[in-house]
Amino acid sequence: MKKIKKKLAWIMAAVIAAGTVPSLPSVWAKTAKDLEIVCFQELPEETLYQQVAYGTRKSSLDLPRYLYAGIREIDEDTENADAAANVTATASDAESSPATPSDATPSEADTGDWKRVRVRWVLNGSFSEQEEYDGEVPGIYVFDAELARDRYVLGDGELPQIEVEVLEKEEKIPEEEVPEEVLEEEVPESEALEIEGETEPFAWETTIDGVEITLAADPGVFPDDVEVLADRIAENQEDSGNARKAVQAALAASAAEGTPMVEIGEIWLFDICVRDGDGETVRPNQLAGSAVLTFTLTDIENDDTDDATEETILQLFSMERGGSEVKALSNQTFAHTVSTEADSFSLYPLVKLREASVPYVARIGDTGYQTVEAAVQSVADGEQITIEMTGDSEESAPLVIDGSRQVILDLAGYTLTGPEDACAIIVEGPDASLTLTDSSDERTGIVNGRAGGISTQDGGTFVMAGGAVGR
């Protein structure tokens, strides 16, 4: 794949390092509007141009959160004009000797004029081959740096651009192109600067409604000024309702795959985020180490399980704010505590489970049902739905498919037994239809109609595509 050609000029960085521009004045006593960025420290070549393996997440890319910038005081118009003339003259002299990463590294002598500024990286749709970054779509992705705060005025400093090439699925990164820092599993210099001097691990804890929440992280994972915010979302709020439905669907899907049936005994929905002193959301710096969230039940004596000898089953999920799906972060565990390594923060449904009294015998997608009749009744008029059986079922009433429902019933090797005094299935109406199938390898699925198998009434349609009907 042809790499996009780009020329990133860092002449100003070389000028500052060579000492051809007069010393920058002290900036510590100036307000934000009085400070101007005149140059940025050049990023290493391996950061500016990256080749990553297929499936690499955006959070794993080398997109530095901070850049080192040369700062100066905005002077009067006449002085600005003189400075601009000096910059122009010096820049022309420097064209014959472009800067290298080491040329632009701040030294101890000029650290008073260099400051670390926060940036965010935005995908440039004009140069990228996709509108959004996707590590499972090979191609070129170009990210532009933007100032995350308005603390400084962007003067002559040119914000950098990073090009990332996602390789094909079977293609490997040539070893000679892998940065030495990666081969040696060392922290890149830019990140080492960021965490220099931090020696204490991060620790935070709180207790909300009988649940102790802790966040522990290695030194350098979070900046010094972060604050952890945690709150439980009330049951009557929309996110809480969405979380309960999503967890129920996830549990049903697990049951269909052979996991023992469980039901929700109690659910907590926690909203957790980490912010810095400016109120900006902070994600863990995974290059510096790991961050671990732990949830522990503290009110064990008031356990609401039906059997006092029954052990608590606990499971943790995550859900995007405003989302409708959950992701399991832990397996179901017979314990009072669960943990997860966090690479970002969101909503966390913490669920106390109990063994289900009645197993699911059918499902539609990821939603399970305790009777096939309940699955049929959930089909809206006009819908075409596949109902897959997940266990043998003995129905107490006929399955009535009427209106304009179009049902595909996959027996999946199980037995559906009808009531003693009526047909097992009734298809009623000219727009109603039933297609019977059996996706099991053994083809042992059967409708056992003790008083009749399948009946069509008033023009209903029945198609036998698999399975068997018996008495």
Image (cartoon, rainbow, N blue to C red):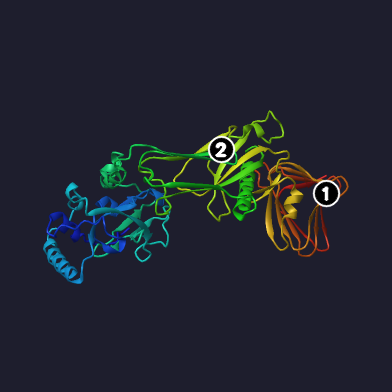
Residue shown at 14% from the left, 62% from the top:
95
What x and y, as percent, mark residue 62?
Answer: 33, 50
> Is residue 23 shown left or right of residue 190?
left
Q: Nearer the viewer, residue 74 or 293?
A: 74
Density class for disc 2 (Cα within 10 Å; few <14, some 14-19, many ≥20) is: few
The amino acid beneath tag 2 is: Asn
> Is residue 348 shown left or right of residue 415?
left
What x and y, as percent, mark residue 194?
Answer: 30, 46
Instruction: Please say whether residue 208 is visible from this viewpoint.
Output: yes
Place residue 36 in its image quadrant.
Answer: bottom left
Numbered disc in front, either 1 or 2:
2
> Is residue 162 shown left or right of residue 371?
left
Residue 331, disc: 2
Sequence-wise first label, 1 or 2: 2
Number of numbered markers: 2
Residue at the extreme front of the image, as rendered: 29
Place residue 38 in its image quadrant.
Answer: bottom left
Above or below 414: residue 463? below
Q: Which residue is mark 1?
A: 397
Density class for disc 1 (Cα within 10 Å; few <14, some 14-19, many ≥20) is: some
Q: Nearer the viewer, residue 251 or 438?
A: 251
**Position of the C terminus by quadrant:** top right
The amino acid beneath tag 1 is: Ala
What x and y, as percent, mark residue 97?
Answer: 13, 58
Instruction: Please say whether residue 465 is visible from this viewpoint.
Output: no
Place residue 445 in its image quadrant.
Answer: top right
What x and y, as percent, mark residue 448?
Answer: 80, 44
Residue shown at 68% from the left, 59% from the top:
384
